[in-house]
Image: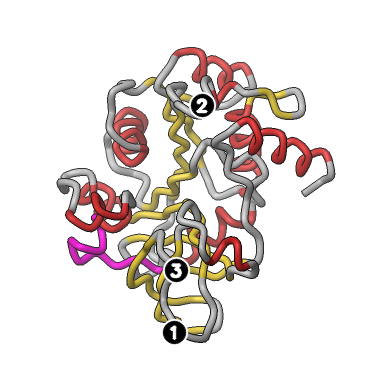
Amino acid sequence: MSALNPIVLIPARMASTRLPNKPMADICGLPMIVQVWHRAMAADCGRVVVAAAEREVADAIIAAGGEAVLTDPDLPSGSDRIYAALQQVDGAGTHDAIINLQGDLPTLDPHLVKTTLATLDGFDMSTLVAEITTPEERDNPNVVKAVLSLTQPSRGRALYFTRATAPSGEGPLYHHIGIYGYTRDALEKFVTLSPSPLEKRERLEQLRALEAGMSIAAAVVDTVPVGVDTPEDLAHAERVLREGN
């Protein structure tokens, strides 16, 4: 793989409508953002930096022994936030692969970060999926589905992402996991693009990249981290952590 100096960037902001002050929500005695930072560090994929929108979040990471930078709270997306952080911590361009790890995945298996990085080889971007095993997920618009062209049993190219149940007919459906790898050039290109028509229609930022002709590789994994968006999700994540994943 050509990328030799990766960096993991974790965007975090307090202004969540469904779970106020989400990054600082307590999970097993630690703020959620610190739990995610611990898992990113355990992945051992290189430097880890939290791109914080608020001082409180940055201070929590620094107190835990980590690295954090402050970014403009009004940035429109996590991709814009990690790019702003990258410009601060690595303006010279020494990091050539970037992992965008969402700050609301406290139960993340660190191996997923390594898989995202390995899957980037030869593509502009990479991401992860898991096979859907329940009817509830197949038809749930909150579960984003990835339509793939598999070139290996567990690797392939992402053709589309949708909230609908797709593709039709017999065969597996895949649950998209919101972790992304980028080459540095791809991230720099992505943040210059305007929101695309399909992105606005599906409310899925990754479609902007596909509409611009960028390639996204996907790896099929067998675990889905608990994403925390509501108080119920928070309670579920805490149960998972207390039971040891």
Q: In the rendering, which numbered label is found on residue 151?
A: 1
Q: Which residue position is annotated with label 2?
A: 67
The residue nearer to you, when weighing 110 against 207, is: 207
Q: Few, some or many C-alpha atoms within 10 Å of disc 3 (few <14, some 14-19, many ≥20)?
A: some
For marks 3 and 1, give the CA distance: 22 Å
Q: Are marks 3 and 2 in contact (CB under 8 Å)?
A: no
Nearer the observer: mark 3 or 2; the answer is 3
Q: Position of residue 34 (x, y in %)?
A: 62, 28
User: Up-down: is 37 above or below 107?
Assistant: above
Q: Few, some or many C-alpha atoms within 10 Å of disc 2 (few <14, some 14-19, many ≥20)?
A: some
Q: Few, some or many C-alpha atoms within 10 Å of disc 1 (few <14, some 14-19, many ≥20)?
A: few
Q: Say which amino acid is labelled 3.
A: Thr
Where disc 3 sits, the SS reads loop
The residue nearer to you, when weighing 66 against 116, is: 116
Q: Which residue position is annotated with label 3?
A: 165
Q: Say which amino acid is labelled 1.
A: Thr
> First in sequence: mark 2 or mark 1?
2
For marks 3 and 2, give the CA distance: 40 Å
Q: Which residues are magenta?
A: 208-217
Any magenta on residue 215? Answer: yes
Q: Are marks 2 and 1 in contact (CB under 8 Å)?
A: no
Q: Position of residue 201 (x, y in %)?
A: 25, 53
Any magenta on residue 78? Answer: no
Q: In the rendering, which numbered label is found on residue 213?
A: none
Where disc 1 sits, the SS reads strand
What residue sits 37% from the left and 62% below the top? 162
For marks 2 and 1, give the CA distance: 38 Å
